[in-house]
């Protein structure tokens, strides 16, 4: 089981930025797909972005042009840079790791709260 530890959440004003980090307990090259999801109060968990071992990236339409996923292989860490934050980005953000792209579910971090409010 892969262990994931997230950090970087907090309170930010609309238009501000935050960077989330997700460090994994294994060599990140062994992970086929890493992603970020979020869950707002009263809503289902939703996809935000992911990155494959080969570097292919997908974004949800709601974050395209504002959020950027990246990976530091030496630190076994994936980042989520969030710019131009909006109140509707408020949610608990979760990191996910799947050993293969076809794997269902995978491993999850504990979540980190992001609140966008003035």
Image (tube, rainbow, N blue to C red):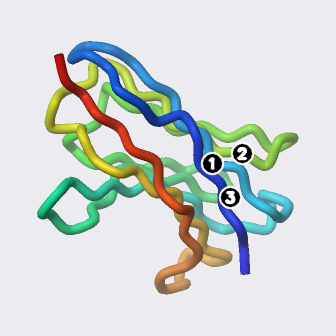
Q: Do the residues labelled 1 and 3 touch (CB within 8 Å)?
A: no
> Residue 52 has which mark?
none
Q: Name the residue under label 2.
A: 77
> Residue 53 has which mark?
3
Label 1 vs label 3, nearer the camera: 1
Seen at 71% across and 68% down, the residue is 3
Front residue of this view, candidates 34 and 6: 6
Q: Determine the secondary structure under disc 1.
A: strand
Q: Earlier in the sequence, mark 2 or mark 3?
A: 3
Q: Determine the secondary structure under disc 3.
A: loop
Apparent side of residue 81 relative to residue 88 in the rendered image (left or right): right
Seen at 63% across and 77% down, the residue is 100
Apparent side of residue 92 relative to residue 4 in the rendered image (left or right): left
As measured in the structure, the alpha-carbon distance from the residue carrying label 2 to the one carrying label 3 is: 13 Å
Residue 2 position by quadrant: bottom right
Q: Residue 94: percent from the left, percent from the top?
A: 45, 57
- Mark 3 surroundings within 10 Å by alpha-carbon count, few (fewer than 14), some (14 through 19), many (20 or more): some
39 relative to 91, above or below: below
Seen at 35% across and 26% down, the residue is 11
Apparent side of residue 100 relative to residue 31 in the rendered image (left or right): left
Q: Mark 1 points at which residue?
A: 22
Q: Residue 112: percent from the left, percent from the top?
A: 46, 48
Q: Residue 58: percent from the left, percent from the top?
A: 41, 50
Front residue of this view, candidates 21 and 12: 12
């Amino acid at each position: 089981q892969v262990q994931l530890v997230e950090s970087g959440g907090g309170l930010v004003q609309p238009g501000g930025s935050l960077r989330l980090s997700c460090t994994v307990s294994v060599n990140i090259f062994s992970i086929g797909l890493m992603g970020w999801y979020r869950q707002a109060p009263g809503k289902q968990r939703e996809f935000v972005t992911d990155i494959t071992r080969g570097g292919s990236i997908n974004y949800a339409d709601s974050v395209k042009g504002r959020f950027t996923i990246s990976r530091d292989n030496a630190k076994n860490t994936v980042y989520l840079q969030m710019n131009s934050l909006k109140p509707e980005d408020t949610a608990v953000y979760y990191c996910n790791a799947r050993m293969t792209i076809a794997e269902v579910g995978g491993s999850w971090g504990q979540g980190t709260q992001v609140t966008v409010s003035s």
